[in-house]
Image (cartoon, rainbow, N blue to C red):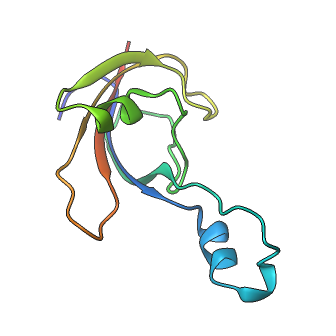
Amino acid sequence: MSKKPCAGVFLSEKLKPVQERAAQTKEFDFGLPSVAQKLRVDYVRATESFSTFIPAHKSVPDNSVAYRCLESDNIEEAVEQWEIPDFGLWQVPAVRFPSFEGTPRRVAALVVAD
């Protein structure tokens, strides 16, 4: 792996665990519109020099390249700042994985020191 601080971040469209549990519980059905799924962290693999903690189930910003790549066949890339303590500005290229019927859309992003 690179000596540069970086992390491979694997994302899928899903609810937060608490939202998932609430959606399955009838007594919380107040007739409100359902919460939209977001791209959330499934797994992170980081270099030793990458000191920022990216928690599982954390959603990426709505304007992230992770969302843009879902709409194209291209690798999308931008400098981004996610709402994570000490995240700072990072170069983030992202690509979507092929999806299959009945499975959530998935994205791989590489978070690299800018």
Query: Does 92 sit above or below residue 84?
Result: above
Number of marks: 0
Query: Does 69 sit above or below residue 26?
Result: above
Of residue 91 and residue 53, the one placed in the foreground of this image is 91
Quadrant that contains the N terminus: top left
Query: Does 24 sit above or below residue 61?
Result: below
Of residue 4 and residue 74, the one placed in the foreground of this image is 74
Q: Residue at x 17, y 32 (%)?
A: 73
Q: What x and y, as percent, mark residue 32?
A: 77, 65
Left or right, 78 with respect to 21, comes to left
Q: Is residue 47 visible?
A: no
Q: Going by the picture, which residue comes out furthest to the bottom?
A: 26
Q: What x and y, as percent, mark residue 10?
A: 33, 49
Left or right, 95 with respect to 58, comes to left
Q: What x and y, as percent, mark residue 111?
A: 35, 29
Of residue 83 and residue 61, the one placed in the foreground of this image is 61
Q: Residue at x 38, y 12 (%)?
A: 114
Q: What x and y, as percent, mark residue 27?
A: 80, 87
Q: Residue at x 20, y 63 (%)?
A: 100
Left or right, 49 with respect to 97, comes to right
Residue 2 is drawn in which quadrant? Answer: top left
Q: Is residue 60 visible?
A: yes
Query: Does 104 sit above or below residue 108?
Result: below
Q: Residue at x 46, y 28 (%)?
A: 64
